Image (tube, helix red, strand yellow):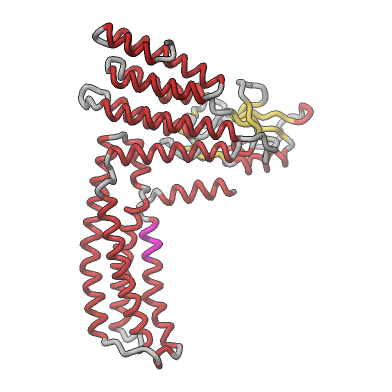
Amino acid sequence: MKGKLTFILNRLREQLWFRPVLFCLFSVAGALVAHLSDNTELYKYVPKIKTESIQELLSTLSASMLVISIFAVGSMISAYNAASNTATPRSFKLVVADDSSQNALSVFIGSFIFSVVATVAMKNGYYGKSGHFTLFALTVGMFTIVIFTFLNWVSKISSLGRLATTIQKIEDAAAKSIRVIHSNHYLGSIPYDKQDTTGVPLYIETIGHILQINTSKLQQIAEEKHIYIRLNCLQGNFITPNKPILYITTEGGVAVDFEMKVLEEAFTLGPVRLFDEDPRFGFITLSEIASRALSPAVNDPGTAIAILESHLRLFAEWIKNESETKAVEPLFSRIKVPVIHVEDLFEDAFRPIARDGAGNIEVQLRLQKVLQSIYSMGDERCKELAKKHSILAYKRAEGALPIKEESEMLKSVSILN
């Protein structure tokens, strides 16, 4: 249940309307709740506030906030377009979910709604002496919030949509997903490594990516029906009607006697992948940016080098979490899930850059140094894979580099040396 709620909250955070709607509701409540102070003895202690002064403040607030809100939306759209064009369209959701932009838009629109509601209520005699003072205090407070929000937003909007900022957001999302999958210890289930097709397969007609798996619900069904479930997918995997989403085994060879479609409700599918609990998507997205930067039309090897540095930090995070993850008693003893193979992470991270940057000595040198670093801090499997990709990258570069001296220089810094 917790995983499902987290998934829903993350999707709401990505919606531009969510925070503005919440702030608008609070604004309306604030404008109307000011009337409650008229039912207290506050009027004995507060000065009388002229209606005209409050009207001037509210009029200024409503007139300026609508303009600033339109300006904010325009600036955000420009930043989103820049992120999609200079980085990759896959980064769009992360840029949209930027907290500073959503908070600013929420404050600007909420302030406008507050001023309109308060003006209408005041002109209809809704407030007494205490209510006028409370409304005045709320309006001054709203002005203060708007000013500080605007100043903070101006400093943040200059970097929103820039390539370096987008890369950092993707790296942070990938690092977070690495920590989440290790802390959840394979969705709280029993991990398995080798391919196993025994049992009754379940196929679904929907085509798309796995976005979320409700293992708690699967465990509940498994206990009720006395079955064992072995997942054939993880978050991010692409599912088609010819690929089983899971396999079912029963206790003592008892036949499956229930409608298997109830198991489909535990899976959320969508047309595009999400960064939640899907570290491979983070590596793939970063490598897409590097491949774009290495294209002849862009020719920006510096960005590819920055991506390699991001990959190194992410692999360090993976190795650290792998070493710290302890064997724990699974929460869902009737569910088995496949592990994420580190081989796939290496392929996602380094093959595109080794291919597209084969003829660039600066990129190839940094690639070999990154693989050397992973080799030095990883376990035996990571060492083996780092060496393998070092050899493959060198072979690609050897045929693409223009002069022999560069090939020799590259070999001297590779794991081959």
Is 41 on the left or on the right of 4, as rendered? left
Residue 308 % position (x, y):
37, 27
In this rendering, is residue 3 above or below 322? below
Main secondary structure found in the magenta portion? helix
Is 317 on the left or on the right of 153, as rendered? right
Residue 305 % position (x, y):
32, 27
Residue 36 in view here: yes
Residue 387 % position (x, y):
47, 15
In this rendering, is residue 211 above or below 61? above
Is 102 on the left or on the right of 207, as rendered? left
Rendering quarter of residue 368? top left
Residue 207 in view here: no
Rendering quarter of residue 83? top left
Q: Residue at x 34, y 17 (%)?
A: 355
Residue 194 % position (x, y):
62, 21
In the foreground, 1 or 339:
339
Q: Quadrant of the C terminus?
A: top left
Q: Residue at x 43, y 32 (%)?
A: 313
User: In the rendered structure, does residue 361 fall within the stretch colored magenta?
Assistant: no
In this rendering, is residue 202 above or below 57? above
Q: How many marks?
A: 0
Highlighted magenta segment, given as a residue range: 19-24
In the foreground, 362 or 132:
362
